[in-house]
Image: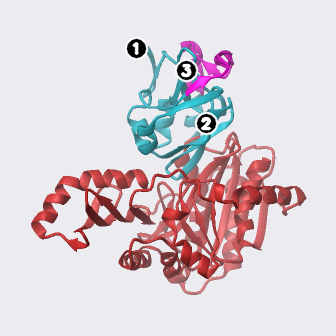
Amino acid sequence: MQQQTIKLINPGTYPIPMKLFDLGEQSWLDTQLIYHALAYLGIEGLVIQKTQNPYICLGLFNDPRDELDLDFLAREHIPFFRREIGGGTVWLDSNQLFYHLIIHRDNPICPVNNRIFFERFLAPVIKTYRGLGLDAVYVPPNDLIVMGKKISGNGAGLINDFKILSGSILFDFDPLKMARCIRAPDERFREEFHGLLNENITTIKKELGEFNEEKIKEMLINNFQEALGVMESSVIDEIIRFKMQELANEKFTDDWLYSSGKPGKGRQVKVREGLYQFSIQLKSFDFSGTRDNRKIRAMEIKRNGNPLEEKEHSHIRKELEDEIFNILLRTA
Amino acid sequence: MESLKIDNIRIPLDRYYYINKKAHLWVKVDGVRARVGFDQFITENAGYLNYLTISGSNMQKGQSFGYYESAKFVSKLFAPVSGEIVARNKEIMENPRKVNEDPYGSWIVEVEMSDDYELQDPDILKESMDIEKWMGSEFKRMADDE
């Protein structure tokens, strides 16, 4: 297969150097608050950091009641946060290196088109993986893939005229932890999700075995600087800290955490770009299976908990498949 | 209905266009009420709208009144006019992709305007020459991406 070309843009003549926040390890909540605060304060920058404690992070349109096994999270003291940008529900822990780019939408190097935004600013991440010998490619809208397996998920959004890209380099990933935290209609769904994650997500550890986190971080920063210009090393000052506290008071409340506005219809989880596992009820049938972006791949149909016989299965599938697929597309 | 055609984008001239905050929203006025929706520039370039949510029952011109997500990118909706939101298009809330299919037939909210003089603000366009100029600059910004 021909290698995907990556384009690192010329930073051009934008007069103000971006700020680089190379923060090491931060508390889980601060890892989220920092990039929100920078956008609200109007500070362009790149944040590179890890979290001290594991947590779940939801996209703006994810409702924790739909997405998470909240009892399990409470028992295990695993916190969760709903960010103000897009993307899906993710498990985040210290085996990942987070990157968050905050750039003014009018910065000449910031694309208007969001697909180009992802592609352009994921180029430094792709270059980092390729520098390690991994043939990472960008798969729209927001995944990086190595040999068909996801190695980085990303979300983005607009806060206060600043476009934000947020994602992580996966050093290592335990699919069981992610699978345990999601809300599943039954244990079989959870087990299948775990299996799909195992098969479809890879990590630097899985691919390379040995690796040096510090060296990878340096490569990532250098690649971003090649694309965005040399950055000014910065720290979280009092003004930023104050804004983070203000945002914590606003966003760590039930009003914010539980107000996604996403319609709840069945259950659907993304494994990687182009592969989703679902479970949905429609017209007294229970449908479960997997789908890609064009069609339903495999589907089991039950009525009152019992699988349908082959003939009826074919009939019902033929009758309702399009409707189910359209519902799933709308609620992905 | 009279409309402009710029590149592959159709722009009906029976409504106003809000250009501030790169909102790309149209405003169709009927008395003191106005319906608000996305223009075709957004629906062609942002990809399919997957989610849409409206917050509160009032909107203030220039302030956020909701969010939408397309291709994993979340953006805010910025109000083109001030007023009370008297209706939300339930069909569009449940299936925002319909906006991509028919942007000018898919209103998002209906507003009882509190100050219709806002329609004369320079960030609200009605004249075809102004709209053409503005849309031209938007296409130029888009071309600069490549």
- Residue at the extreme bottom: A210
Q: Which tint was used for chain A?
A: red
- Residue A137 drawn above or below residue A184: above
| Residue bearing mark 1 | B1
| Residue bearing mark 3 | B33
Label 2 is found on which chain of the structure?
A: B
Point out residue B14 in the picture as x, y percentages from the top left corner: 48, 15
Task: Name the residue nearer the viewer: A139 or A153.
Answer: A153
Q: Is residue A67 left or right of residue A47?
A: left
Q: Amino acid at mark 1?
A: Met
**Residue A331 appearing in the image:** yes
Residue beneath the point at 46% across and 35% down: B89
Q: Is residue B36 left or right of residue A34?
A: left
Q: Residues within 10 Å of mark 2 (few under 14, many from 20)?
A: few
Instruction: Say which quadrant the N terminus of chain A sits in.
Output: bottom left
- Residue B97 in the magenta stretch? The answer is no
- Residue A222 drawn above or below residue B89: below
- Residue B136 in the magenta stretch? The answer is yes
Residue beneath the point at 59% across and 24% down: B112
Residue beneath the point at 59% across and 44% down: B75
